[in-house]
Amino acid sequence: MRAFGYVSAPDLPTALGAVAAGARPLGGGTNLVDLMRDDVERPETLVDVTALPLAGVDELQESGGLRIGAMVRNSRLAADRRVRSRYPVLAESLLAGASGQLRNMATVGGNLLQRTRCPYLRDHAAACNKREPGSGCAAIDGIHRGSAVLGTSEHCIAAHPSDMAVALVALDAVVEVQSLRATRRIPLAELHRPPGDTPHVETDLAPDELITAVELPALPVARTSRYRKVRDRASFAFALVSVAAALEVRDGDVVDVRLALGGVATTPWRAREAERVLLGAPATEETFRRAAAAELASAISRPQNAFKVELAQRTIVATLRRLAAERADDAEGGPA
Ligand code: SF4
């Protein structure tokens, strides 16, 4: 591991000053420190931001939503009773991620900025446009079972690894970022960039900006929401496919819906094509299948990850089927 400088920021201006001077923010360190050990990340200085007053989950009085500080630990957010009751998809996505120990360390801001687990990112003997721009992509003709089928380019097919971000993009979350210059708010759906021809540029953040909070809007449909994750083993594994969904059904028709996918795309993927098919249509198996097929119609798969196209459709249908059944149970006063 290369030598690096370390400063602990006691307040936000100090942290923003350090970031503006080129320091990398250090939250729980569950991804960044690993990548430093593998000589993929080479920051000259880390600024520890865990002591900043950004560890609260607060009501947004005017809008009725929640403001989540960037330093809130994943385990704490998953346990928050307001999150569990008003945004269960978010709590479930957090509990589906990593391990208990990692969730105790990982922060909300860091979770959003974690990098792909494509094996070639850490393999210095292989070409990787993310690690070394212009070097090529070893995954395309190499190991790509875990790679994306949506949002890819000829320069990178790496899947985005976060579970939490998939739930947040379904919930229309907004990210607050600050710098010494300004504070701005970015819809989460616009934070992560598709790889295009610059896969090493992964987010819309400027080098001097720090994520300070995530805001959730009041969203009644989110009370009936689920996160379903399909993976190779029951815990501590990244998603092959995941689905974040919220569904409201009235008189048999879908009157509100949010849908997002993980494990299959280069960014947390809002499934807008599927939402278009679902909205206003009967909440039936046939509609769910049509919606899933519409979303995956643009998928580009390769030999090892072609299974994800069918798996994603089945997981979408299964998640919507369960939510529709839960709504029906609620309407009738509980399951029989
Ligand atoms: Fe690198 Fe992306 Fe190709 Fe993986 S898929 S080798 S991260 S460029």
Image (cartoon, grey):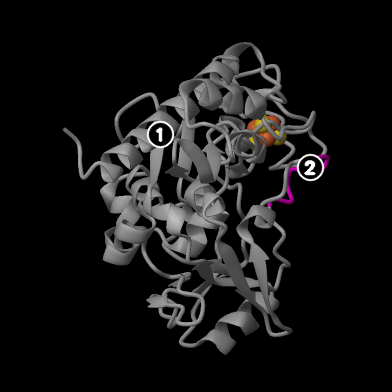
Rendered position, 331 above or below 325: below
Q: Image check: 153 left or right of 226?
A: right
Q: Residues within 10 Å of mark 2 (few under 14, many from 20)?
A: some
Q: Image check: 60 left or right of 182?
A: left
Residue at 38% x, 24% y: name it. 232
Q: Position of residue 104 (x, y in %)?
A: 30, 58
- Specify the quadrant that holds the C terminus: top left
Decide whether residue 124 is among the magenta residues: no
Looking at this view, name the residue that lies furthest to the top.
Answer: 303
Q: Which residue is mark 1?
A: 229
Looking at this view, name the residue that lies furthest to the left.
Answer: 336
Of the image marks 1 and 2, the number of the one nearer the N terminus? 2
Q: Residues within 10 Å of mark 1 (few under 14, many from 20)?
A: many
Mark 1 and mark 2: Cα distance apart in space: 32 Å
Residue at 71% x, 68% y: name it. 207
Q: Which residue is mark 2?
A: 133
